[in-house]
Amino acid sequence: MDQSRLRVKLNPRSSRDRLVGRLGDLLKVNLTSPPVDGQANQALIKFLAKILKLAPSSLSLAQGASSRDKLIVVNGLSPEELWARLDRALDKK
């Protein structure tokens, strides 16, 4: 089974949920959820799953539970397919 790691810079309490852009192998994401009791982490997993067209259970937070810098493990996608899907989503914004 393919597995990828995704570095994310999260900006909680934004005006809307959106992919901001890519900086090398780092993805910048804005979410409306507050960083309270893991709400932003859960929202990030759901948001990325929707963008990647995967079940939320395919994604897990590996590092950064209380930080803006996150490491997400994505099961079911190779790194190439992960970035291809993210780049397509970024092109649509």
Image: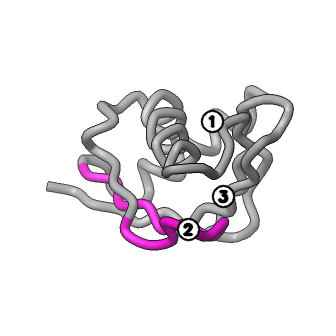
Q: CA distance from mark 1 to mark 2?
A: 29 Å
Residue 45, given in percent of the width and then of the height, sits at: 45, 43
For label 3, count other residues whose C-alpha is less than 10 Å away and answer few (under 14), some (14-19) or many (20+): some
Foreground mark, 3 or 2, reads 2
Most extreme residue toward the left, as rendered? Answer: 1
Q: Horizontally, is 59 left or right of 49 in the view?
A: left
Magenta stretch in the rendered image? 62-75
Asked if the residue under mark 2 is in contact with the one under mark 1, i.e. CB atoms within 8 Å, the reply is no
- Going by the numbered disc 3, the residue's amino acid type is Leu
Amino acid under disc 1: Arg
Residue 56 lies, in percent from the top left, at 33, 36
Q: Amino acid under label 2? A: Ser
x 66%, y 58%: residue: 27
Q: Is residue 51 left or right of residue 72?
A: right
Residue extending farthest front: 37
Sequence order check, earlier mark of 1 and 2? 2
Q: Which residue is mark 2?
A: 66
Disc 1 packing (10 Å; few <14; some 14–19; many ≥20): few
Mark 3 falls on what kind of element? strand
Residue 27 is labelled as 3
Q: Please name the predominant secondary structure of the magenta segment in the image.
A: strand
Q: Which is more N-terminal, label 1 or label 3?
A: 3
- Residue 34 painted magenta: no
- Spatial CA distance of label 3 from label 1 is 13 Å
Farthest right residue? 15
Q: Nearer the viewer, residue 80 or 4?
A: 4
Disc number at residue 88? 1
Relative to 21, 8 lies left or right: left
